[in-house]
Image (cartoon, rainbow, N blue to C red):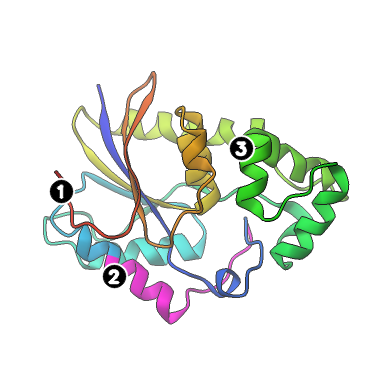
């Protein structure tokens, strides 16, 4: 039994624009971010989604709404919210400039990181999440075990709710999508930043996930 999972990163927000860590905090979509949602929707317009979901953060809900408004194949018109697909919780680092956060995190390593992608490439996805948890003076940031535990719970819910061959939309978040492809055996993908509105397609089973398309913001689907 396998479902076809279409993961889409939300559109650009004002925190994305100003290069601030976002996590569980929220910021509205920019005008460009709204267009990212519509553009992804136009590229996915011919896919009949048997289920449509988003994280429960506003930026993901709104992006999913714009995607579904473009659908021409009889898909749901509104996403169901699933908290398990939230972004990583960056704790007290949320809302601050990403380079300022990096300066603080570099105090915990002898090999400084140039940016977040550099950190993931050097430490791996799990090590990067655990560093945020270690460095957060308020101990609010999520470690890898907590993060991947809820993602797996979200997958279990989707597999329980859907049948073999179903096509399922989930609008989620950049770090979450990176961590998902890493979990399914692609650390080289996790080192790349996810574009706002980009599509990642995974064949999901109870046992595993096969990444068929990654970080695609150009093609119209279904893609050969």
Q: Is residue 25 magenta?
A: yes
The residue where tag 1 is placed is: 222
The mark that comes first in sequence, 2 or 3, is 2
Foreground residue among 115 and 206: 115
Disc 3 is placed on an element classified as helix
Residue 62 percent location from the top left of the image: 40, 67
Relative horizontal placement of residue 118, taking residue 4 as reference (left or right)? right
Relative horizontal placement of residue 113, taking residue 33 as reference (left or right)? right
Disc 2 is placed on an element classified as helix
Of badges 1 and 2, nearer the viewer stands 1
Of badges 2 and 3, nearer the viewer stands 3
Residue 197 percent location from the top left of the image: 37, 61
Q: Is residue 196 magenta?
A: no
Give the residue displayed 56% in from the left and 50% down from the top: 87
Q: Is residue 69 above or below residue 204?
A: below
Relative horizontal placement of residue 215, taking residue 3 as reference (left or right)? right
Q: Are marks 1 and 3 in contact (CB under 8 Å)?
A: no
> What mark, if any, has residue 38 been given in the picture?
2
Magenta stretch: give its range: 24-39
Q: Residue furthest top?
A: 207
């Amino acid at each position: 039994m396998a479902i076809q999972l279409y993961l889409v990163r939300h559109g650009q927000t004002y925190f994305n624009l100003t290069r601030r860590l976002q996590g569980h905090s929220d910021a509205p979509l920019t005008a460009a971010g709204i267009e990212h949602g519509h553009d992804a929707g136009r590229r996915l317009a011919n896919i009949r989604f048997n289920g449509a979901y988003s994280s429960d953060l506003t930026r993901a809900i709104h992006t999913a709404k714009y995607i579904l408004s473009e659908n021409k194949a009889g898909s749901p018109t509104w996403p169901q919210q699933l908290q398990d697909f939230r972004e990583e919780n960056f704790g007290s680092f949320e809302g601050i400039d990403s380079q300022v956060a990096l300066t603080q995190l570099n105090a915990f390593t002898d090999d400084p990181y140039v940016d977040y992608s550099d950190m993931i490439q050097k430490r791996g996805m799990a090590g990067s999440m655990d560093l945020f948890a270690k460095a957060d003076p308020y101990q609010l940031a999520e470690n890898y075990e907590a993060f991947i535990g809820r993602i797996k719970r979200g997958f279990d819910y989707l597999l329980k709710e859907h049948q073999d061959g179903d096509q399922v939309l989930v609008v989620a978040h950049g770090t979450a999508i990176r961590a998902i492809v890493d979990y399914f055996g692609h650390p080289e993908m996790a080192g790349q930043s996810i574009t706002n509105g980009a599509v990642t397609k995974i064949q999901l089973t109870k046992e595993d996930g096969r990444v068929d398309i990654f970080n695609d913001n150009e093609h119209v689907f279904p893609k050969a």
